[in-house]
Image (cartoon, rainbow, N blue to C red):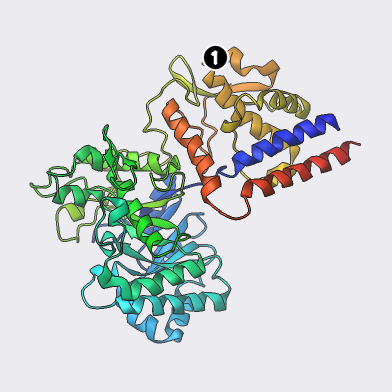
Amino acid sequence: MGREFRLGFVLSLLLLVLLDGCSGSYVGVCYGRNADDLPVPDKAAELVKLHNIKYVRIYDSNVQVLKAFANTGIELMIGVPNSDLLSFSQFQTNADTWLKNNILPYYPATKITYITVGAEVTESPGNVSALVVPAMKNVLTALKKAGLHKKIRVSSTHSLGVLSRSFPPSAAGAFNSSHAYFLKPLLEFLAENGSPFMINIYPYYAYRDSASNISLDYALFESSSEVIDPNTGLLYTNMFDAQIDALYYALMALNFKTIKVMVTETGWPSKGSPKETAATPDNAQTYNTNLIRHVINNTGTPAKTGEELDVYIFSLFNENRNRLESERNWGLFYPDQTSVYNLDFTGKGSVDVATGSNSTSSNGTNTWCIASNKSSEMDLQSYWTGLVVLEMWTVQLSSLASLVMSQIIWHLMLLMHLTATTNKMGLAEIACSFGGAGIRVDKDPSYDSCLYMTAGSNKTIASNTTAIASKSLSTRNDFPAWFSTFFLATFITVLLGVNHV
């Protein structure tokens, strides 16, 4: 039993790390279609798949778009436009009919995960704010009738104008009193149904309208200096975090501490009017590249360190029907599907190669160390048990279910551990040998949201470690998640021991 107990202890420690695991924040793209020269939806879906974009927001429930994304695995956020709020809020049958005709024929082949009911209603002409919550309730009721209310969440998107102001975050964190009549029932709906508060955030506009007070670097995630919130002492190196924290403080002020925040639009234009000098391809690339890295690293914000924050970049294409020059040039792609600028959605290409990265270099080529398929299960178990204490925090597994598949476990764990260990030591072929248990490959073993960073400084690693620790503390204030995980691992250990008796 001694060997099995040691193995179980290792698994217990490993599972603590898995609380963060391969899940985490994601980056999606808004697929707006306010243009007359865009490719057909099928082509747009192919472009999205080609660039490994797994989350897309559209602003309606266009049938051709829903069909185009069928069987792609891409998660879709669809919308009920403001023009439909009146009919949806007045009669339940309208929401039922819409769901029956626009959603059910295409689900689940088209992976719809969110429905936004209304968009930035506080900014829209006409007083439609009061219609939002009744419409949301009717959409939710329709989903419940179809048995989909646990799989498709309902919310509504908002501009930053719902806040009275946005800096300093701790003091500015209050909702605009003129919107209180509809925000309170909205927040109650979100809290009751586990839906996120959806916000559209544009540091570009804040910089453009107040360039004398805000540095461009601060807006682009490039600032080397820090802005201090005088009330909390928290340090901000970018405007995005400050604006998000202002929203967090506003939610906390109304005692809605459990509602998650989701950014449903953000980005930077690549071209603008002659006065919009910051609207350039370089600045757009810088903002979105830094944004992706910031989100995928699960850094969180100063007030919510390690908090997951899902973000959608606006927009997939330049849209020529928008009124202003800058509004027509937020796209990542031109209508002919060529890139406006290069953007790596994995968040890896934006980081400079440095010592401590997860790739070794041989003659200038990145390589990774993985488990050899010729190694026996016992070989892999032996090497893993000896190495796990050396660098436990680098280990990630794709799912808890893998624990019952010992052959897969050891291959995955050794894959991840050897990758980090080999490269941290800065060694080459011999460092990946491990008695023949490891081999070097030149293909990145990353998959989905489990990323083996091809580069990263000690600062990046430290921030990720902090995120793991902070999330496990801030997620719940009641029964600690790590305790149940440890208990489960111990139980698995007992089973392993019984099987070997």
Nearest the eye: 28 or 90: 90
Q: Is residue 386 left or right of residue 444?
A: right
Image quarter for residue 287? top left
Q: Is residue 207 above or below residue 455?
A: below
Can the viewer see residue 313 in this picture? Answer: no
Q: Is residue 341 left or right of residue 414?
A: left
Q: Is residue 211 above or below residue 459?
A: below
Q: Looking at the rendering, in which quadrant would you find the N terminus?
A: top right
Residue 401: horizontal and vertical position, in percent? 69, 47
Q: Is residue 97 above or below residue 75?
A: below
Residue type of the residue flagged with mark 1: Ala
The residue that disc 1 covers is 428
Residue 65: horizontal and vertical position, in percent? 40, 63
Q: Is residue 163 left or right of residue 476?
A: left
Residue 27: horizontal and vertical position, in percent? 41, 48
- Assign a secondary structure to mark 1: loop
Residue occupying the far left of the picture:
274
Residue at 25 percent of width and 78 percent of height: 127
Can the viewer see residue 490 in this picture? Answer: yes
Residue at 59 percent of width and 45 percent of height: 19
Image quarter for residue 408? top right
Q: Looking at the rendering, in which quadrant would you find the C terminus?
A: top right
